[in-house]
Image (cartoon, helix red, strand yellow):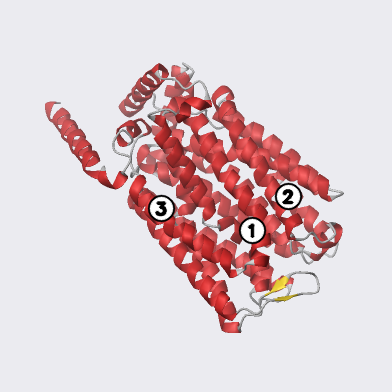
Amino acid sequence: MGKHTQAYFVGGVSALGGFLFGFDTGLMSSILVMDTWKAYFHTPGSVGVGVITSLLTAGCFVGSLCGGYLADKFSRKRTIMIACVVFSLGAAIQCGSRNRAMLICGRFIAGLGVGVLSMTVPVYQSEIAPSHIRGRLVSLQQWAITWGLLVAFWIDYGCHFIKSNASWRIPIGLQIVPAAILFTSMIFLPYSPRWLVDHDRFDEAQQVLARLRAGGDTNDPEVHQELEDIKEAVRIERETAVRSYLELLRFPIRRRVILGVVIQALQQLTGINVIMYFAPSLFEQSGLTGNNASLLAQGVNGVINMLATIPAILYIDRWGRRKTVIIGSIGCAITYFVQAVATGATQHKTTNADGSLNLNLPQGVSHLVIAMVYLFVISFAMSWGPIGWIYPSEIFPMHIRSKANSITTAANWLFNFVIGLVAPILMKRITWGLDLIFAIFMFAAIVIIYLFYPETKNRSLEDMEIIFTGSVWAHKDVKRINEYDNANANGLAEKETSV
């Protein structure tokens, strides 16, 4: 870590915002199959389950849209703190739920907090990070999500042995703990230096940069240079300041907004949250009988997800965004296709006494399906998981970064909401057909990324103007960008020689 220890620390602590979403997702995936929860809420059908799970993401959609305004006005730091309070309120309502309406209301309120955090945390991380480790730092958001899932899976596994309503109330109430830790920690973390410059607080920005880059040395040349670069970028951006969301649809920003929206939508069209929300049900359909077996398999799923994210954190700034996500898409598509073919060829559907579906797969096919789920999670965790958050957070100019990221993040939650709402119904009605649909989306993603998405690794946030002023066909624009890099390198070499 070296001189960037402070940047890693700040990025890691703020990543607790991702932990909250992962924790909630992990909790609900296992709570949905708890007998005590089913009995208390009168065994919701597939539509009821879809509404209960997706109302959190509906709140996330609204929260992410509000987050852009809040982050610009009150700062990234304070906005994260506000979101923690809102999330805790929603968690408390869920924990004390007396009926289904109260549970849904609590989930929507918690979603407001998660939505604001999901938009603000990556922006905050990208703005405090040096360019050569920005991808790694923003990846901590996704790694925190996987840790939230992992912790929640095993808490649920332990609590499901409790034969009372405490089995689901305790895990839901525990969500307040990480929210309180994040709120308290943010009191001691710095403001974004780029936000400070945008509000003409130059001395504070210099002190923050010195803390993050040079161990507190405000006279460090790199600190002075970065501060001047940010000032110049902000000055230029103010000349074309975005004062309304409609201006995001105008040239030349429109292209980046579309790319940000599409990559966030494609992250959800991987089907990852179908796996994370409904994996215990999928495992039961595939032949794992009893809550213990399905919850244990989900716990293993959480461990795999967390561990598979580590290579992306370490090497994402070396691998690059394009190559990583294309390879990940190939892996996701293959696992879905194998699962669809194996299930479609061997399933024999019957309905259990509680209304759940059993595919009656042969034991070998059942094991194959579970293996494909795990391989899919590995493919996603090493690619789409982190890059879905990294790419939108780094491609926009400072003056519109919050507004633009609120739109791209809202797209993520909108698709998450729709998929969460319809997935339980489709899982029951078309079974393997849902796997085939997701496989098609992943094959399409490979083409889309190759054609339209420029590489952004190791670029400063102020450098993105050069990357996105060329052809919309990214695969044809590589030569121009290489020429710019060569000219830039020659210019630096001449400068050093003259010195």
In the depicted view, which residue is nearer to us: 350 or 209?
350
Q: Nearer the viewer, mark 1 or mark 3?
A: 1
Name the N-terminal-most of marks 2 and 1.
Answer: 2
**Image coords of residue 170 (percent x, y):** 78, 54
Is residue 129 something one can see in this rendering? Answer: no
**Image coords of residue 419 (percent x, y):** 61, 53
At 78% across and 67% down in the image, what residue appears?
Answer: 161
Task: Please give the count of numbered marks on the rendered protein.
Answer: 3
| Label 1 – label 3 distance at C-alpha | 33 Å
Residue beneath label 2, please?
174
Q: Amino acid at mark 3?
A: Leu
Q: Amino acid at mark 1?
A: Ala
Crowding around mark 1 (Cα neighbors within 10 Å: few <14, some 14 to 19, many 20+) is many
Q: Amino acid at mark 2?
A: Leu
Q: Secondary structure at mark 2?
A: helix
At 78% across and 69% down in the image, what residue appears?
Answer: 355
Q: In the figure, residue 39 lies in which quadrant?
A: bottom right
Name the N-terminal-most of marks 2 and 3.
Answer: 2
Image vertical order of residue 199 relative to residue 493, above or below = above
